[in-house]
Amino acid sequence: MDLSTVETPCLVLDRGKLEKNIASINQRMATLGVNLRPHGKTAKNIDILKMALDGQQGGITVSTLKEADYYFSHGITDMVYAVGIAPVKLNRIAGLIKKGASITILLDSIAQAKFVAAKGQEHGLTIPALIEIDCDGHRSGVTLDDPLLVDIGHVLHREKGMALRGVLTHAGGSYQCQTVEAIRAIAETERHTAVACSEVLRQNGLPCPIVSVGSTPTASYAEDLTGITEVRAGVYMFYDLVMAGLGVCKERDIAISVLASVIGHQKRKNWVITDAGWMALSRDRGTASQKVDQGYGTVCNLNGDPLDDLIVSATNQEHGIISDRSGGALAWDSFEIGSMVRVLPNHACATAAMYDRYYVTDGSTEISDVWHRVNGW
Amino acid sequence: MDLSTVETPCLVLDRGKLEKNIASINQRMATLGVNLRPHGKTAKNIDILKMALDGQQGGITVSTLKEADYYFSHGITDMVYAVGIAPVKLNRIAGLIKKGASITILLDSIAQAKFVAAKGQEHGLTIPALIEIDCDGHRSGVTLDDPLLVDIGHVLHREKGMALRGVLTHAGGSYQCQTVEAIRAIAETERHTAVACSEVLRQNGLPCPIVSVGSTPTASYAEDLTGITEVRAGVYMFYDLVMAGLGVCKERDIAISVLASVIGHQKRKNWVITDAGWMALSRDRGTASQKVDQGYGTVCNLNGDPLDDLIVSATNQEHGIISDRSGGALAWDSFEIGSMVRVLPNHACATAAMYDRYYVTDGSTEISDVWHRVNGW
């Protein structure tokens, strides 16, 4: 099957770029001497996660219990569920643990520790838990200076039904960096904060075998990971325009694209209309706050070659509008009605989430595989 | 089953509000003496579309062929596929027609008319087609002053394999209106342009039995639909914060909400953290350009009662941050860890698209039904 014959819009994955991106980060982690715990939230596919686990210790990160069920059913047992735990999710987690999964949960409050302990006791299980650390103020977690860190640690360590396994932090603030130097600095803050929190726990007689950090930008630019036991990242497998805007990758490294058909010309406006609207591209406008606003994505031809200065400048639900950044006239012959283009995404996680499958190519337009995704919760 | 026991995030549909919204638009259409062809792109569910067809002639609108397959498999035969046709989709359309569907396609170019004719001839079918009209410059279509209108009409009427059925326009520009008066004006422009195009076709000896207009804002405020044979709308079934911001509905009319668990407190920042991030709410920020920016949605308690001035001010993939508009302190006792809130969406189509089902309630927290959605293409 060839891309030119599949129904649009659909999601294309370039296997060669995927393999190169994975090999590159794995090499970095080997050089830095740390295990990578790949995040399954971007790919949501077992074939890709198996590739990402090459040379690693075998554990992954998940963002939903649907991912946990799915990856476990495909043979991955060691998982960190890296979203603060809610009570309504504990029965499902207990079920996974009873089936043989080693699923570690995350929390940042005494209240959570208490209901985890109660659920572990109810099921006769010891639920492993990490304390979430706030290293950059962007979201959840306990700060290094907060006595709550040790208080939670004591509850986790003391109560039956759960076990303190360590600390976890995520430098989500790295997505807003403007320079590589800023990413390097935040990577060191992420490392230092996690390690310092682990030392506080140990100084208080508490165990802290896991010291987990990660984000694709910090994983790409960290220069020292002393004291860190594992790094989590997910977007690096595909990369996207936000990562390219941050300097974390080149646009040519982006492994996924949305295949779209040209369905109209508005010549007075210099618009090409396609059938890839926001339902196909997602509503993510992550590059809007970067130096170069890429609209809803940059445009390539069917072969994946970039068409300079063309972006998807606007979308409706099932319509995309392609225009030249400068507002100039388009080469209409290159966009015959029924011809196809490929759009590189602002944010790989958000765009891929609109699809239930990848059409995998080896760089040509021939489809070598169809890989499924597990969306939802 | 009760909402308080289901896993979060999930999508809740208030059946009473849904029924009221549908009855209200159907009453308007009856008063204006026009048939409603409800759009299946928002609900993507047969139970809801059957309710929307109450008192109408039985035809619907679809935005994807997945919807067409699905609604046809549930007994709806008359469908307008209201996105400009692409060649790769014609075999699937021919297959539906052969199975007994009456599926009308949309186009705005001679090139499309030619490949539709070829496909119709190949399959021995007559594919019905509408010419897309551009009434407000927001997207696709032929303008009233463009001789292409009649040229396309002649090709559609003359060539074997297809048939000219009329004209269709969509006042998408109505979503950017700032006042009800502006919506009324654009509704009249939508009507007038479609009717004038139908007259041009007829004056040129071409048939134009269908004159189709529609958008939820214009359907809500049109005062005269003389010459129009059908109105298309979809968002009105659920409404959303964008529609409330336009004055098309009240916030209390919004029939869908995202149920979320509280998973953290950041008291120094006056943030409540939930497990409904952009994956659960969508990346849609449609209210950002309105008078009141509602962030990623406004917050209600578990019962659906609004919590004044609380919005989801920021999101990550699986995390939402609730804060007070004014930055003030939150009533922490109302947001215990593990308690639940409901978030009203900016854009019903985008938020609902993140889910494969609705948990249907009758106004209480008891779940009376689970209705499935058909996402994808």
Image (cartoon, coloured by chain):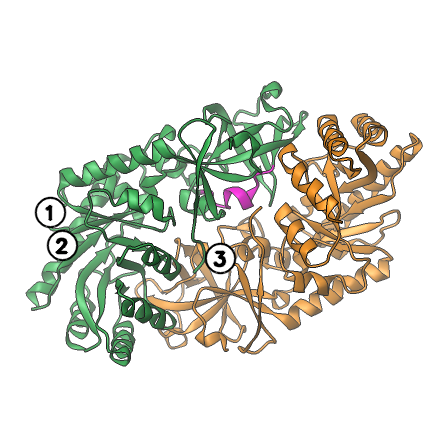
Chain colours: A green, B orange
Question: Residue at image x 39%, y 70%?
Answer: B330
Q: Which SS class for mark 2?
A: helix
| C-alpha span from label 2 to label 3 | 34 Å
Structural crowding at the residue carrying mark 2, measured as other residues with C-alpha within 10 Å and reported as few (<14), some (14–19) or many (≥20): many
Left or right placement of residue B193 versus residue B88 in this view: right
Front one among A30 and B282 = A30
- Which residue type carries mark 1? Thr
Question: Residue at image x 66%, y 67%?
Answer: B18
Q: In which quarter of the image is residue A182?
A: top left
- Which residue type carries mark 3? Leu
Q: In this view, does A108 lie above or below A373?
A: below
Q: Name the residue under label 1.
A: A226
- Which residue type carries mark 2? Val
Q: In this view, does B44 lie above or below A100?
A: above
Q: Name the residue under label 2.
A: A195
Question: Residue at image x 15%, y 76%?
Answer: A158
Chain-order first, disc 1 or disc 2: 2
Instruction: Write the start and end of the magenta stretch as one range.
Output: A275-285
Q: Mark 3 points at which residue?
A: B281
Which chain's residue wears label 3?
Answer: B
Answer whether residue A280 is magenta in the image. yes
Front one among B118 and A333 = B118
Magenta stretch, main secondary structure, is loop
Q: Quadrant of residue B24?
A: bottom right
| C-alpha span from label 3 to label 1 | 38 Å
Q: Which SS class for mark 3?
A: helix
Q: Would you say the residues marked 1 and 2 are in contact, meaning their CB atoms lie under 8 Å apart?
A: yes
Q: Which SS class for mark 1?
A: loop
Left or right placement of residue A331 versus residue A22 in this view: right
Q: In this view, does A272 lie above or below A142?
A: above
